[in-house]
Image (spheres, helix red, strand yellow):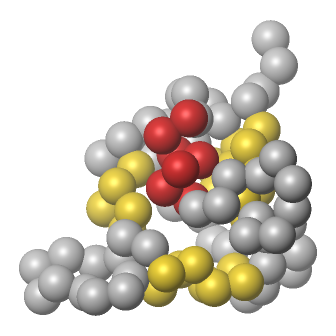
């Protein structure tokens, strides 16, 4: 079985424009590759996925446009967190 691989990029044709959009299309075990840049998003991760920067560590930043006091940028319900 082949692992689902999704790309997030604001500029590349055929790529998801947001991480949230990629997460909605991801199945358990999917790899979501993130093009370098800053993503202004609040994320809810409910599937077992891997988020990985395409470039070197530190090339991807996820920043919530407005951070509620009781919630961070990423809310994980079924995901493994690894360093980007």
Residue located farthest toward the top when viewing the structure as drawn? 1
Residue nearest the viewer, comparing 23 with 83: 23
Please, is residue 56 above or below residue 18 in the view? Answer: below
Give coordinates of residue 40: x percent, y percent: 49, 81
Residue located 73% across and 70% down the image: 10
Q: Nearer the viewer, residue 18 or 73?
A: 18
Q: Residue furthest left?
A: 70
Q: Position of residue 31 (x, y in %)?
A: 71, 43
Q: Quadrant of residue 49?
A: top right
Residue 5: name its quadrant: top right
Quarter of the N terminus within the rendering: top right
Q: What residue sits 87% from the left and 54% below the top?
A: 13
Left or right: 57 as drawn, with respect to 68: right
Which quarter of the rendering shows the C terminus?
bottom right
Q: Is residue 80 visible?
A: no
Query: Residue drawn 19% across and 76% down?
Result: 71
Task: Indicate whether 25 appears above or below 18.
Answer: above
State the count of labels: 0
Residue 18 percent coordinates (x, y): 58, 62
Q: Is residue 11 left or right of residue 67?
A: right
Q: Position of residue 22 (x, y in %)?
A: 59, 47
Is 48 on the left or on the right of 3, as rendered?
left
Say whether residue 46 is visible.
Answer: yes
Determine whether 18 is above or below 42 in the image.
above
- Eyeballing the image, is 61 above or below 73? below
Image point 44% across, 73% down: which residue?
41
């Amino acid at each position: 079985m082949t692992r689902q691989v999704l790309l997030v990029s604001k500029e590349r044709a055929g790529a998801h424009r947001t991480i949230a959009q990629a997460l909605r299309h991801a199945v358990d075990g999917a790899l979501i590759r993130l093009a370098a840049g800053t993503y202004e998003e609040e994320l809810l991760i409910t599937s077992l996925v891997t988020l990985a920067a395409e470039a070197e560590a530190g090339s991807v930043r996820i920043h919530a446009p407005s951070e509620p006091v009781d919630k961070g940028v990423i809310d994980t319900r079924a995901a493994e967190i690894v360093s980007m």
